[in-house]
Amino acid sequence: MTKIVRFDTEGNLDIKGEFSEVPDALEFDGESDYVDVGHSDVLEMNVGDAFAMEIWIKPYSKHRSVLVSKYDTDSHTGWWLRFGRGTDDSFIVFGLRQDLSDQILIQTDDEVPLDEWMKITALYDGSGDAAGLSIEINGEEVDYSIDEDDTLTDITGEYPFTIGARDAGASWFFDGKISRLKFYHESSLVGYWPLNEGSGDTVHDKSGNENHGSIVGAEWVYSIEGNRFDTEGNLDIKGEFSEVPDALKLDGENDYVDIPHHDDYGDMSEFTLEMWIKASHQQSMEFFSKYDTEDDASRSFRFYNQNNNNNLRFLGSPDGEDFDSTDITDTELPDGEWCHIAMTFDKGTCRGYINGEHVGTSSVNFDSVYNNSGVNLWLGQSHYMDRYLDGEIRDARIWNTVRSEEEIADNKDKRLSGDEDNLVGYWPMNEGEGTTAIDSAGSNDGTINGATWEESTISYSLSIKETGNTTNTIFSETGPTKGLVGW
C-alpha cells in the first residue's frame, strides 16, 4: 500500500496511510430501531458484581429511551442506562431493578444537550447500594441524585443485552446516533462493540467473547462527516485533509537551516540527536553542526558522514578548542531512501542508530561537549569546509538526555507534541511554505536558507491514539476514573 502524508487543514496532525470513508455509528429512529446482542453469561451481572459501561451518544430529541440494558419487561428485572427520565427531558438515569417496586437508581442533576456527541460512563461498585452508582460525562463525574435505594438480592435472568431500547425492542427506543460501546466486569473488558462495520446487519464484539449483535432497523451513518479510516478500518481520524509538503530539499551547494544558540541544550554531557534524511551516500553529509574553526574556542560538535565512507561520525570539543572524533558505525546508510538516523552521547560514549536499530558504539576522550553560545546550530551544512547535504531532511530532534534504543525505535515514526520530557529542540519541518522551520519544543525557530519544500512520503506507522479532541477524533479511549475493583 502506498503511504502518504496527510495533515488536517490546520497543519497540526500528521497521519500516514491511504484512507477510505467508512460509516462508524448507528442511527436509531426513536420508534423501532435497536440492536439485539442476546443473553450471555459473561454479560450477566448480579447485585454483588462491580460493572461499568461506556457509550458514545448523540441524542436528537428529548425522548425517554434506553441506551443499553439487560432487562426483562415482564418481571421488571435487570439493569439499564437510560436517556430521559420522563417523556420530555434529557437526564441520564442509571439503575438496577429486582422487581417493579425494588430498585436502586440515580439521575443526573442536569439535563445533557441535544445534537452533541458525548461519552456516557455508568459505574456500579457491587455494594448493593445506590451510593455505589455513579455517572461520568466526557470523562468527568457529574452531580446526580439518588432516586431509589431499596434492598436488592437478585437481578439475574436470561434477558437480552440490548442497545438502543429495552428488552430486545420491547419499548423505549433511542432517537439519535450511538457508537463505541464498552462493557466491563470488575476491571476486565467483557464486551466491546465499536459499531464501525459500516454495512450489513451485524455488530461485532471485539472483546474476544464474540457476543455479536443483530441490527434491527438502525442505519449506518458517519459520526462526523469526513471521517477517515485506514484501509483496515482500525484508525479513526476526523477532519478535512490536504497533502502538505513536510520535508526540506537541500541542493548540496548552499542550502541549510540556521538555528540560533540555545542554553536549553544544557552542559551537553548527555544528549540525543535524531533526524530523517534521504540522500545519496556518495558524498560527505552534515546532519547537525555547531562547530566553527574560524574563531578561537568556537568548536562544539558535529554529527556527520565523511569522505564517502557512509558511516555515522561524531566530532566534539570539551572546551571549544581541543577536539576528538570517532566513527560511531560502519553500517551503510540506505542510498537514496528515507532513513532515520540517531546518535546518543553519554559522558563520552557515542552510540549510533539507523532506523531505530543500534548499529555501533565508540567513544571520545571527553565527558561533555562545550555548548558555545557564539555559534549557531546548522542542519544540513557544516561551518567546517562548507560541507552541504544534497538530499532531503525532516523531523530533527535534540534531547538533553540519553534515549534508549527502545525509545528511539518507538518514537521515530511518530509526530511528537513538543511537550515531551527532555525534548529541547524539535523541528518537524512540516510548514510546507515560507522560510521558517518552527521549533515545536520551544521558541528557537530556524531560518531556511535556499531549501525548497517537498512531500516526504515517509511510511510512518498508523499509531495515532484517539484523544477526545474533536479536531482529530471525538472518541476518547480512557477508562472510567473510579468505581471498579482493580481499575
Image (cartoon, helix red, strand yellow):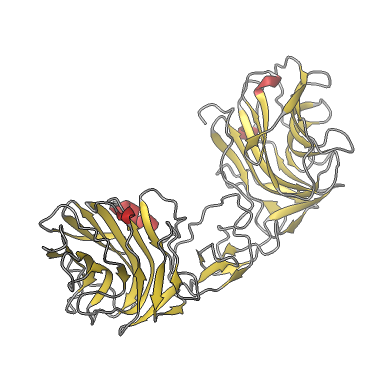
Query: Where's residue 486, x and y in %?
Result: 50, 28
- Give the residue at the far right of this rendering: 87
- Left or right, residue 247 beside residue 286: right
Q: Position of residue 248 (x, y in %)?
A: 41, 76
Q: Residue at x 13, y 64 (%)?
A: 321
Q: Is residue 360 left or right of residue 277?
A: left
Camera-nearest residue between 178 and 146 = 146
- Image label count: 0
Q: Residue at x 12, y 55 (%)?
A: 366
- Residue 197 x, y percent position in the rendering: 65, 57
Most distant residue in the top direction: 151
Residue 91 in which image quadrant: top right
Give the x, y percent position of residue 392: 37, 77
**In the rendered image, is residue 105 in sight?**
no
In depth, the one of 123 and 268 nearer the eye is 268
Q: Quadrant of residue 426?
A: bottom left
Q: Is residue 251 visible?
A: yes
Rendered view: 396 above or below 83: below
Q: Quadrant of residue 308?
A: bottom left
Above-or-below relation of 24 to 143: below
